[in-house]
Amino acid sequence: MGQSASTAAVPSCRESNHSHRSKTKSTSLISPMYSEDNDGFQGIIDGVVDYISELPDECLACIFQSLGSGDRKRCSLVCQRWLRIEGQSRHRLSLNAQSDLRPMIPSLFSRFDAVTKLALKCDRRSVSIGDDSLILISLRCGNLSRLKLRACRELTDAGMATFAKNCKGLKKLSCGSCTFGAKGMNAVLDNCSSLEELSVKRLRGISDVAAAEPIGPGMAASSLKTICLKELYNGVCFGPLIIGAKCLRTLKLFRCSGDWDKLFQVITERVTGIVEIHLERLQVTDVGLAAISNCLNLEILHLVKTPECTNIGMVSVAERCKLLRKLHIDGWKANRIGDEGLIAIAKSCSNLQELVLIGVNPTKVSLQMLASNCQNLERLALCGSDTVGDAEISCIATKCIALKKLCIKSCPVNDNGLEALAGGCPNLVKVKVKKCRGVTPEGADWLRASRPSLAVNLDTGEPEHQDASASDGGVQDNGVEFPPVVVHGHVATSNVASSSAGTGRSASFKSRLGLLSGKSLVACTLRRWSSGNSKSRGF
């Protein structure tokens, strides 16, 4: 890579010296790189100036930072200078954290001495690094701001405590499948006063709820802005931490045991600035939702598979959380949240921009209210809704003026519904239809022909069988995220009737499209729906 860059800088000379350079390219081009210590030296190769040798280290570092990991590794092999600059300019490093990493730590961090973001990941079947390795890393990386630990089962409370004392500037900690306990977590919170994000998944060092040491905010009380807890048998042990994080803005809880209703009542009294809440498979009822309604600044709410939450709780949220912009509900086919809750949202949350309904059965009444009152609604997903048919889609097409993206999955919609989209939703740019047995390829083709600017994606593939558990990134089962729209898991069927009577087609539409026979409805997953304004996330 480095050689080709050098030759590209002087194309005219390359042509004139092509025959000779082709014989010596592998060695002569990199030889001047070793002479950067000679002041005033300008690399000359067979009479051709090597301008790359004259680039300042800072310029090369900027170039390296724009390359991918593989290209950076290849660049580091060009010469000693590039090896040194590439190591000194690398701020992000991911290592296989097996026990045999220990002897290599000094040399690794002598080369990569500017690392601020570090990931240590161990295979579940291997022995991970221990306390001595983590402590040695902390001594070498005093400026570490982000740390991700995965399956580092040999780490203990003592090792985490020493690490925290050596890396007090840590801003983000993510740990999963580790075995240290409450003392190690408290040590991080007591020493890292700049900690802003904490993500904990399957922390195995805390097993006895009754005897577990409470985890408090410590010195991070004023800095913590995001807390994400996943698959914790004793998630309520983190209650004092959440209550004490007075600047908390985002709270995500996935499959954490405990009575969260009582905890939410205390949390929302003490922490008033929360703007985003995700709840998945949590023991929470309308009492908890009523407490959440005290978060007057709430903008994003995800309720996924919380069957004890009903219309009553949704009404409480709607009446007080008037700034709500994004609402995701996976009703798990429990039919506990429906028109009543959605009408309350429509009446009070006029800023709603994104609505995802999975396993929820809205009718034309609530959809019409949402379309009429939520004039900023841009993204709508209706998945596994047995009451959403052609009449409901026609209502959406007529009323949702701002709608840009529409996703329909496993609903009793047919080609007549698509016909309504041809002339409605003037700002619509993308529509995805999946596993709607009444919609045919001819119907999708007709919509594309009628509205060329509209991207129409019709998925009529075979059923897929996927794990029903949520992803590590926190995307819920059968969940949808805009943008892109994602739906995971299986959609069950139920006996709730559609308000649009559904499968009949007009004779003229049949003759125009030459409709095929309806395909059977199958449970499947909706793949990622790409979008230009998708948000980047990552470690």
Image (cartoon, rainbow, N blue to C red):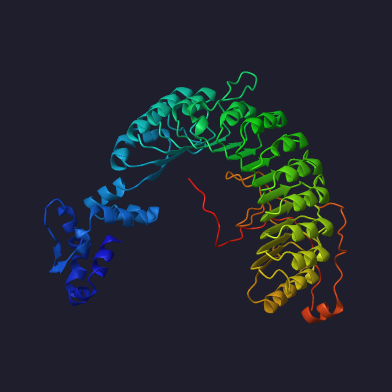
Q: Nearer the viewer, residue 482 or 340?
A: 340
Q: Which quadrant is home to the N terminus?
A: bottom left
Which residue is depicted at the point 73% across and 59% down? 409
Residue shown at the point (66%, 68%) measured from the top left = 427
**Relative side of 355 to 220, left or right:** right
Quarter of the rendering containing residue 287: top right
Query: What residue sits 64% from the left and 31% below the top?
Result: 267
Residue at the farthest top position: 211
Is there any visible trace of residue 174 in the rendered image?
A: yes
Residue 527 vs residue 193, the one in the foreground: 193
Place of residue 62 in the rendered image (x, y in percent of width and height, measured from the top left): 32, 55
Is 178 on the left or on the right of 422, as rendered?
left
**Residue 156 sits above or below residue 416 on the image:** above
> Where 116 sits versus 347, above or below?
above
Position of residue 36 measured from the top left corner of the image (x, y, whole percent): 16, 53
How far from the left and from the top, in percent, is residue 195?
Answer: 47, 35
Is residue 359 visible from the viewing direction of this image? Answer: no
Of residues 416 and 493, the one drawn nearer to the viewer in this rendering: 416
* Point 79% across, 75% down: residue: 515
Q: Where is residue 447 shown, x and y percent of the image?
A: 71, 75
Would you place residue 24 above or below residue 299 in this image? below
Query: Against 359, is 140 above or below?
Result: above
